Image: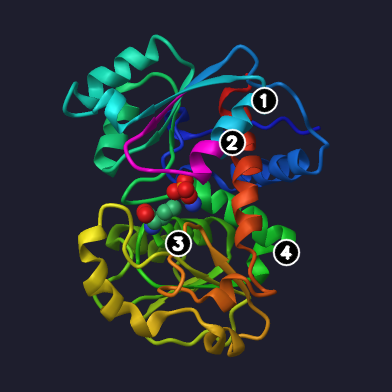
Amino acid sequence: MIALVISLRGLDFIDVADLEPGDLRRLLDRAHEIKAGRWAEKALKGKHVAMLFQRPSHRTRVSFEVGIARLGGTTTTLTGQDVQLGFRESVGDAARVLDRYVDAVVARLRSHADLLQLARSSVKPVINALTDHSHPCQVLADLMTLEELRGDLAQQHVVYIGDGNNIANSLIQASVLTGLALTVITPPGYDPDASVVERARRINSGKNHVTLTSQINVQHATAIYTDVWASMGQEDERAVRQKVFSAYQVNQRLMDSARDAVFMHCLPAHRGEEVTDEVMDGPRSVVFQQAENRLYAQMALLAGLLGG
Ligand code: CP
Ligand code: NVA
């Protein structure tokens, strides 16, 4: 069996872009092996992981807790009230304390700058469990799902439609790494992060893997992906965004214009806004397969980072 060695910069997993193509390949192979029951090492035996959540979470929290337990490790989960990062103590001080107790920190922080500060102040590996900028663990599971469904990522075309948010940013980074064709359709003014796009254009020069547009055309999609129009922290903008994004809903009419495409969503979904019940519950929806794969992709990541 090939050893899974992930050469992450400084051993943190902040973004998909932290991975080399070979690291990602090994990680996805390991994730498939775990799911198939062909790899069951207790790679985290004796290891303790702190989980820090400044925002709500269902999938991320449960899949990490279950995954760490299956790998033989233990967890302490802290929510916003417990640590009160930046209020009760600085991000740097909190990191230096956690460092003395645990072997890794999984953190869902409001601000990406705070996550970078946490990682800089911490000797132990820090894993990004979502920030306003990116959601790399979600996209690892999405890549695994796409491989299960259709094999070679370089032969597939994901059309992401909606807000140019953390999911869109991580998908762009994944496209650069894998050759997955990606079209990001957003209303004008709701583009993905400019630095993520600029980096993709620079690395991909001439290959045209990533297309940004406000024109809704999903004809050549092998997967249509959407996410909420107002992310966590943007609740006040929800009414405005419902108007701006209304033409960008994934409904049966849109799915009918891409006959070959599966439907993807990171969840939680706001049914009736970015996606209709008919599509969410329809035969082409793979949203629960994506959610399930969070477990295996993160187990592979943890085993790579902490498994000795
Ligand atoms: N997709 C995802 O990260 O879900 P949670 O916010 O429930 O963790
Ligand atoms: N864009 C969403 C993703 C939730 C998993 C948010 O940040 O709220």
Farthest-out residue, left = 87
Counting residues from the N terminus, which is met first, the one under dot 3 or under dot 1? 1
Question: Given the image, on which type of amino acid does mark 1 rest?
Answer: Leu
SS at badge 4: helix
Q: Can residue 304 be seen in this view?
A: no
Label 1–label 2 contact, CB within 8 A: no
Question: Given the image, on which type of amino acid does mark 2 rest?
Answer: Leu
The magenta segment is 50-62
Give coordinates of residue 31: x percent, y percent: 69, 42
Residue 59 falls within the magenta-colored stretch: yes
| Residue wearing tag 3 | 172
Give coordinates of residue 218: x percent, y percent: 53, 84
Q: Looking at the picture, does residue 187 appear above or below residue 142?
A: below
Label 3–label 1 contact, CB within 8 A: no
Measure the alpha-carbon separation of dots 4 and 3.
20 Å
Measure the alpha-carbon separation of dots 3 and 1.
30 Å
Assign the C terminus to one quadrant of the image: top right
The image's colouring method is rainbow
| Residue wearing tag 4 | 149
Badge 3, how many Cα within 10 Å: few under 14, some, many 20+?
Answer: many
Instruction: Determine the image quadrant of residue 257.
Output: bottom right
Q: Nearer the viewer, residue 74 or 104?
A: 74
Give coordinates of residue 185: x percent, y percent: 40, 77
Measure the alpha-carbon separation of dots 1 and 2.
11 Å
Question: Given the image, on which type of amino acid does mark 3 rest?
Answer: Ile
| Residue wearing tag 1 | 71
